[in-house]
Amino acid sequence: MIKTTYNGWANYETWNVALFINNDGVAYEIAMNVGNYNEFVLNVMELLPPVNKTFDGVSLTDSNIDKDEIDELITELNEENK
């Protein structure tokens, strides 16, 4: 099986969500204070209504997002926050 990547991420959608987390101050703060991507999405939708997409229009609930990769990003942010 050939793994396709986009700028080092699993795919465009995953890369775009990571870009959103790293480039939006509020999204970054939320990511630093949650345990995983599912919690991140719930918090963003609660704290930033009606935000449910990245700046480039990728839905935060897009099924192509590699949640494991974004969970790793969130874990790294949490470790930096300690």
Image: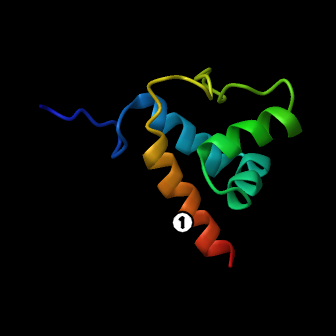
Judge whether 16 appears above or below 57 on screen.
Answer: below
Image coordinates for residue 50, horizontal then vertical, percent? 84, 23
The residue under the point 54% across, 44% down is 18
What secondary structure is found at the residue carrying circle 1? Answer: helix
What is the total number of numbered labels drawn onto the structure image?
Answer: 1
Q: Is residue 40 left or right of residue 37?
A: right
Image quarter (top left, top right, bottom left or bottom right) of the N terminus: top left
Q: Is residue 19 left or right of residue 13?
A: right
Examine the rendered structure and indicate whether residue 65 appears above or below residue 9: above
User: In this figure, which residue is indicated by the disc labeled 1?
Assistant: 76
x%, y% of residue 68?
Answer: 44, 46
Q: Amino acid at mark 1?
A: Glu
Residue most toward the left? 1
Q: Determine which quarter of the picture holds residue 52.
A: top right
Q: Outermost residue toward the bottom?
A: 82
Q: Give the residue at x 44% y 48%.
A: 69
Counting from the top left corner in percent of width and height, residue 51 is at 78, 27
- For the point 87% across and 28% down, the residue is 49
Query: Residue 54 is drawn in which quadrant?
Result: top right
At label 1, counting other C-alpha atoms closer than 10 Å, the crowd grade (few under 14, some 14-19, many 20 or more) is few
